Every structure is written in structure tokens, then in C-alpha cells.
Amino acid sequence: MNRQDIKDYLTNTIFHGIFRMKRKIFFFSFILLFNIIASAQNPGEYWMRFKTPEQAGWSSEQLEEVCRNSNVNSIVLLHKGKIVYTYGNYCRRIKCHSMRKSFLSALYGIYIDRGMIDTAATIGSLNITDTTPLTSNEKEAQVIDLLKARSGIYLPSGQETVDMKKSRPQRGSHPHGTFWYYNNWDFNVLGTIFRKKTNKDIFEAFKENIADPLYMEDFRLMDGVYDYDTLYTSHPAYVFRMSARDAARFGQLFLQKGRWNGEQIVPQKWLELSTTSHSVTTTPGISYGYLWWIAEDFKGMKVYYAAGTNGQRILVIPSSEIVVVINVDTYRGRYIRDVDTLIACLVVGSRTGDAISNPEFVPLKKSAGVCTIKLSRKEQHRYVGRYSIGDTILTVSETADGLIVNGPHYSYKFSLLPIGKNRFFIEDINLELTFDFNGSGKPTNPQIKKPAGG
């Protein structure tokens, strides 16, 4: 039952029933409606939360203590499609890092089902090349091998970490399909293949097929960019940023086996395949599916999750109908030392029992915004241009929605929110950009700093 159905039911059955129905029947209808609402899984346009975590079977005090000492930007904990607890600014868009791979996996499932991608196709048949020419053996790798991180192609790639470079096997040491290695070459080439075979931009496809149907509240096309490392490879990384409350919708979609409001968004068969173990990894107890991580025994439960550097997580526990989202402010280099312990404290250590029989639900409030001032089009336009801050080049441009800046943090674009004379708040990275003016009134001497009190 969606929001409109519930609204209609309230109008026709409850309010009219006050005048037309006997008290007993009215009471029964109210209880029936309440149970329908309480048992609903996917959220509507806005999240609903338990009035208190205690009503869901969690301890507010323990959750608060766990989160306060965690070094996270925000946490969202779901149970049966409703929010149990939030911490931090869950509306703030954070770099997702390698969680991007699970987003692409979902898109692959959709477009494979439409017959647009063949997982048995070889790299050679798809005319995939790179800065370093591929060998004939490497060209035999199939799309399915890349989805499993088993291509056997060991070349430099965009956004490789130091550890990935150190552990990269010697080129030609393993035939395709035989050896698992967490390989950004595989993941980035999957992005190239997706665009080639579907004629779709990854971020437009994500918005059209996932973000919009799930009513994601914060995701915009500018929150996805391609990060090119042309010195080593011709295949860019497809980099997402996302708020915790939107990431929770993605996790809830998978918990619901790919269905949302009665529509099959991601094919259930693909969802099951992608979250099933296909490879043993180098981490004990952890396996790998199709761009998803799997733990068969996490505190006695099977879980699967999207993982990003420094502790980013979208974790799904099907048996308990729980979704956990954790994002970290990697803009400032923060990280979680032991994310598994944090998750265990959230889903097990802070749990007190089952939800009460008739919990109350209230809308989730949006995080407090920034107080802005209004700029005329002429005032706004004067800031458009390129600026240097040390070795960093900032480009300020104008859109229908206001000013944006790109330069820091890959090729991301950030909204510039005017907060005072010559002062802007850089949305999401939560810094201030200030300017002076030269004698002719042109903005000059840009400075980036932390906001007062921030």
C-alpha cells in the first residue's frame, strides 16, 4: 500500500466512518489500517521512523554512546523499512568510494535483463583496449570474469590504492576466471562496457532506473563524475557521492529483493546471484559476489554489503530485516578503525529485544540547512571564472540553480551557497570560500577555510 492508497483509505474509511459506522467497526478499521501502515516495507517520498528506538527494540542510550565515539559523519539504522536511529548529518552527500561498484552491479542486472549486455562476451569481442595494449590471452576474459574480479588482467587503473598496487599479481600470471584479485581495472572497464553497450551515461542510468523510482531525496546528476587517470589508463573510475538517507533506500531495495512499490526495479534473480559468494577473498570469512561483499557468519547472521574506503558501508541483514548505512567524512581524511565492531555494536550490542506490538511512527526530519542570502543574477555572475589557491585550480560556473565550484576532490562539483558578503558555503564538503575584490570590483584572492565553529 503506497502513500496515496493510505491517504484514500483514511479519508473514505476512517473519517467518513465516524459518521456512518458503529464504534466497534470503526475501531476495527483503525486497527487494521494501523497494522497495514506498520507492516509496510519500502518508504514513500519521505522516511518514517520509530518514535523512539526503544519501540523498535533498541536502546537509545547505547546507540548514542556507540555513535558518539565512532568518528562517523552519519549513520542510518533501518528495521523493516523504518528508521530506528540516525546519527549525524544524514542529508550530507559523502564520497562513496568503492561502494560505487555495488551501484554499477545493480545497473548491470537491469540492463542484462533487457538483453543489452552479454556476460559471456569477451573483452576482445567488445573491442576493449587500454593505454597498455592487451595480449591475446587477456582479450579472452569475459564480462562475467570482471564482475567476479577474476579477469586475469593486471594493469594500472584509476583510483588504485597503495595496497592494491602492491598486491597486484604479475601480468599473465593467472588465466581469466581462475584467480580473485580486487582489481580496479576490472571495475573501471565494467563502466566502459556499460556505457558502450547501453549508450547510457552511468549516472543518468542510475538516476532514471534507481534514484528516481526509490524517491532518493538528495542525489543529483552532478553527484556523479568520471575520474580520469590518463597517464596509466583510458578507463575512468565512475565516482558517486550520496547521502546516508539515500544510500539507505538502496540497501532497502536489496532487502526487498529488488522490489519497490510493487515494481521489480532490479531483477530478483540478479540480486540473488550478485549477493551470492563466487570467490573466497584474502580476508578470512569474507567472500565476493558480483561487486558485493558477503559474510556468511557475522554474529551468527549472513550479511552482504557495499564497502568503501575508510569505513563506508551499506550493509544488509536479510534474516533480521536490517539495513545499516555508515558514511565517513573522507573529505577531511577521517576513517573508522574497526567498522565491523561498530556495526556489531549497532545491530547486536544495542539491541534489547523485539519491537513493541503497536509502535508509533513519525516523519524523519531533514537536517538543519545553511542560512543563505539571495544574490541577483548580476551579483552571481561576477564570481564566474577560474581561480588559483596554491596548486589547486577552482572553477566557478553558473547554473539555473546557482553557482557551483569544482576543483577540490577529484572532479566533483559542489554547490556554492551565498552566506554573506563575498562568502560562500561549499555544500557537502562543509567549507567556506571567501573572496576579496580588486579596484575594478572583480573577485580575487580566494580562500578556503573551515566555517566559524566548524
Image (cartoon, rainbow, N blue to C red):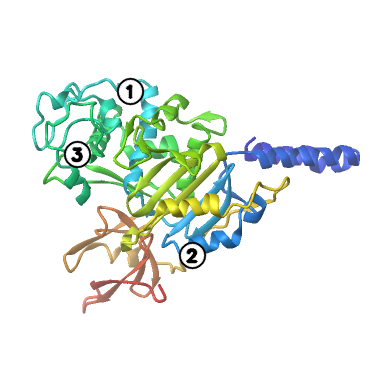
- Residue for point 66% across, 39% down: 39
Quarter of the figure with residue 402:
bottom left
Q: Distance between the residues labelled 3 and 2?
A: 40 Å
Q: Nearer the viewer, residue 269 or 240?
A: 269
| First in sequence: mark 1 vs mark 2 | 2
> Does the image show residue 108?
yes
Left or right: 63 with respect to 303? right
Cα distance between the residues tagged 3 and 1? 20 Å
Is label 2 in a helix, a strand or a loop?
helix
Which of labels 3 and 1 is toward the front? 3
Q: Which of marks 1 and 2 is in front?
A: 2
The residue at the point 73 percent across, 42 percent down is: 34
Tell me the kind of residue under disc 2.
Arg
For residue 68, the mark is 2
The front one of 280 and 63 is 280
Tell me where residue 396 appears, x and y as whole percent: 27, 60
Q: Name the disc covering residue 235, or none.
A: 3
Precedes in sequence: disc 3 or disc 2:
2
| SS for dot 3 | loop
Q: In which quarter of the image is the C terminus?
A: bottom left
Instruction: Please report contact status of discs 3 and 2: CB closer than 8 Å, yes or no.
Output: no
Q: Which mark is residue 116?
A: 1
- Towards the viewer: 419 or 10: 10
Residue 410's x, y, as percent? 25, 54
